[in-house]
Image (tube, rainbow, N blue to C red):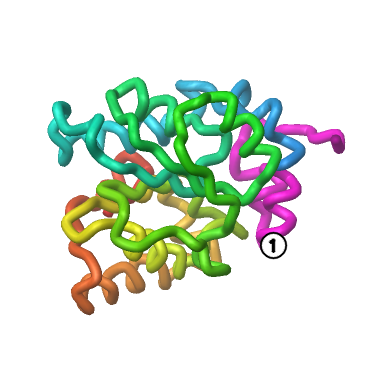
Amino acid sequence: MSDISISTDLLNLPCHQKGVEPDQVTTFYDDWATDYDEFLSPGTYNGPQIALEEIMSHVPADLCSTLRVLDVAAGTGLVGVILAGAGFRLLDAVEPSLGMIKILQEKKVYQNIFQVYMGIKDPMIPPDTYDLVIAVGGMAEGHLPITSVDDMITACKPGGFVVIAMRYEFLQNTEAYRGKLLPYMDSLEGRGCWKMATLLAEYQHIAY
């Protein structure tokens, strides 16, 4: 394992640097996996909790255990753990980093794991399968491309929800998203692919 010096500023991490490529991002996460949960502890990284609150504003609590959920860019499974704690039981994960997957599997909350980058290659995920597709922290430099949204919509059942939680500033300072991501989402809505339920900028995340 390579030696990694982790900054307390998430924006200064090597995996967020301008021009970083997906394969470089994957290698970084492979090396970071064993320390990831310790670094992104509650209070430091609140994306999973914010996303859960948004989900529960749309999903009746008594239905949680019956809903199929796809966790995109699942990392070490932090989102899966918090969802399981809220009563979700039918969880699958998408994660390209094998190092992260090894830690994720230890959480024992996921049924199926797909090792793939959504939006880059055919994810081989069955269409119209999930009631809820969630991506927390996966939208960043060199991470999920805007075309990953198409894959999320495809995986989601008609009438289901796609929830995306990301740092708001990435909309301005990430070339792949600046002036592109929100218009692309709007174009998908215009084509009838989905309908925006909520846009929350005050929490530094976007939920569609």
- Which image quarter holds the N terminus? top right
Q: Horizontally, is 150 left or right of 4 in the view? A: left
Q: Residue at x 54, y 50 (%)?
A: 114
Q: Residues within 10 Å of mark 1 (few under 14, many from 20)?
A: some
| SS state under label 1 | loop
Image quadrant where residue 38 sits: top right
The kind of residue tagged 1 is Glu
In the image, residue 23 above or below residue 90: below
Q: Tell me: 172 left or right of 204.
A: right
Residue 16 or residue 36, whichever sits in front: 36
The answer to whether 184 is drawn above or below residue 91 in the figure is: below
Residue 13 location in percent, x, y?
68, 43
For the point 28% across and 73% down, which residue is it? Answer: 188
Q: How many marks?
A: 1
Which of the image's four quarters has the C terminus?
bottom left
Task: Determine if the magenta segment contains residue 25.
Answer: yes
Q: Is residue 25 left or right of residue 68?
A: right
Q: Residue at x 64, y 38 (%)?
A: 100
Toward the right, the furthest residue is 2
- Residue 192 within the segment the image draws in magenta: no
The image shows residue 20 at horizontal and vertical percentages of 69, 60
Q: Residue 107 at what x, y percent from top left?
A: 53, 24
- Residue picked out by circle 1: 21
What residue lies at 56% left-to-right and 39% top-to-bottom? 75
In front of the other: 155 or 166:
155
Is residue 64 found left or right of 93 in the rendered image? left
Q: Nearer the viewer, residue 113 or 14?
A: 113
Along the line of sight, which residue is nearer the eye, 35 or 114?
A: 114
What residue span does the magenta drawing correspond to? Answer: 1-29
